[in-house]
Image (cartoon, grey):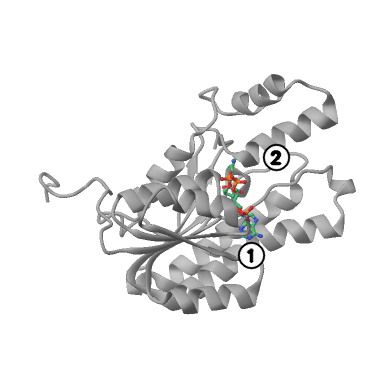
Amino acid sequence: MSLLGKNVAANNLAGKRAVITGGSSGIGADMALAFAEAGAEVMITGRREPHLQKVADQHNRVDFAVVDVTDEAAMVALFEKIGRVDIVIANAGAAESAPFAKTSFEQWQRMLNVNLSGVFLTLREGLKQLNDGGRMIAVASTAGLKGYAYVGAYCAAKHGVVGLVRSLAAETATRNITVNALCPGFTDTPLLAASVDNIVAKTGQSAEQATSHFESINPTGRLVTPAEVTATALWLCGPNSGAINGQAISISGGEV
Ligand code: NAP
């Protein structure tokens, strides 16, 4: 069947309701504005109210709720309040680094809580409200597909997200619900800026040196942009992507 004349660009989300965790900055904020522009009603969440407000102020189809993804009761209440949805994007996450032998149990648990348990709660509560034919996406990382030194807890959590997505995808396929993981390489966001600051503080390198270290890991020699991650999410939520299910999609210029 020819696609000529059909809406193959994933730009018509009119009437769809989307929830995006971690919408107060970076990739989640970029996604929120693009999904709203494509016609969806978007609810973003995060802990920092002023940042959420600033994103919501930029589009009349973006609303926000202050919710910590690691708080089970708050996540249950959030989705009960929102009601039926068509798109759930578990994007909230955080990265901390430490040599493995110096990784405290608290840090290990912090990384698993926000990056894995937060995704679990988002997808579990989101699924309860998801319409048949809905789309779920978890923003994992290339750190969910390969190992990087000094971020063992983050890598373990992101590998866990990929496993969770594969399992859930098998469970929901008969309802035409797809569940996929996005695996960006190093992406130009405040999270990466914090990692650069950390390297500067710990090694005495300049910010330019630290940034070019991350750029050099990507075969294209540059950072991934939030818009490139958003474009993949829009495509997955579009009308012709229903057969893409249980995948971990690398958005890394070929690093993975
Ligand atoms: P970012 O700008 O720091 O965004 C992280 C978002 O997560 C913020 O909106 C933050 O909101 C939210 N968040 C963090 N902890 C939370 C919590 N406990 N409860 C609720 N929200 C929480 O960084 P980003 O790069 O866009 O990160 C988005 C996702 O992409 C993360 O899962 C990250 O692991 C992943 N990723 C990033 C890169 C990269 O190089 N940047 C690469 C691969 C994957 P509040 O602070 O307001 O709570």
Q: Would you call the spot at circle 1 few (<14 residues within 10 Å), some (14-19), or many (20 or more)?
A: some
Residue at 84% x, 31% y is: 202
Label 1 CB sits under 8 Å from any ligand 1 atom:
yes
Q: Which secondary structure lies at badge 1?
A: loop
Residue 23 shows in the view: no
> Which one is in front, 189 or 182?
189
Above or below, 164 relative to 151: below
Q: Give the farthest residue toward the right.
A: 102
Residue at 71% x, 60% y is: 112
Q: Are marks 1 and 2 in contact (CB under 8 Å)?
A: no
Q: Would you call the spot at circle 2 few (<14 residues within 10 Å), some (14-19), or many (20 or more)?
A: few
Q: Position of residue 68 (x, y in %)?
A: 63, 64
Residue 69 shows in the view: yes
Q: Which secondary structure lies at badge 2?
A: loop
Give the residue pinned by disc 2.
148
Above or below, 66 relative to 132: above
Question: Which numbered marker is on residue 229?
Answer: none
Above or below, 238 relative to 87: above
Quarter residue 207 falls in: top right
- Disc 1 residue type (three-letter): Asp
Horizontally, residue 55 falls left or right of residue 186, namely left
Give the residue pinned by disc 1.
68
